[in-house]
Amino acid sequence: MEIQDGYTFEKFFEDLKNGFQIYYTYMGCRYLIYKLTKNCYKNELIEAPPKCPHQKNAILTLKRVREIFDDMTELQYKFEM
């Protein structure tokens, strides 16, 4: 499900806090982000161009998530049936 324009960081933070996993595109790479514990978020690289220097898995703080939020595009909730 594509997330609508006007989606704020506060709503994004609430969704992560409530256990949602969210796909997003950042700098030409596709990622999945979700909350592990307080102030600890897992960022997984899902799709990337060949020879991409980005980490496949990273642990981010809320401060870092806030820094990259404005450059995230194509946000989508992860659904499993």
Image (tube, rainbow, N blue to C red):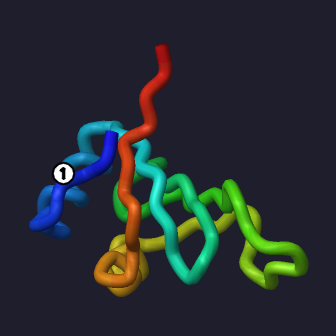
In the picture provided, is 1 more to the left or to the right than 48? left
Q: Which residue lies at the image location 24% right of the left edge and 47% below the top edge?
A: 15
In the picture provided, is 80 more to the left or to the right than 45? left
Corner quadrant of residue 42: bottom right
**In the image, residue 39 lies at what x, y percent?**
37, 64
Q: Establish if 22 lies above or below 67.
A: above
Q: Establish if 70 lies above or below 1.
A: below
Q: Which residue lies at the image location 35% right of the left edge and 72% below the top edge?
A: 62
Q: Residues within 10 Å of mark 1 (few under 14, many from 20)?
A: few
Task: Say which element carries label 1.
Answer: helix
Q: Which residue lies at the image location 33% right of the left edge and 39% below the top edge?
A: 1
Corner quadrant of residue 8: bottom left
* Three-letter code, disc 1: Glu
- According to the picture, the residue beneath numbered tag 1 turns out to be 14
Q: Establish if 77 lies above or below 8.
A: above
The tally of labels here is 1
**In the image, residue 77 lies at what x, y percent?**
37, 42
**In the image, residue 72 lies at what x, y percent?**
39, 73
Q: Which residue lies at the image location 16% right of the left edge and 64% below the top edge?
A: 5
Corner quadrant of residue 46: bottom right
Name the residue at the top extreme: 81
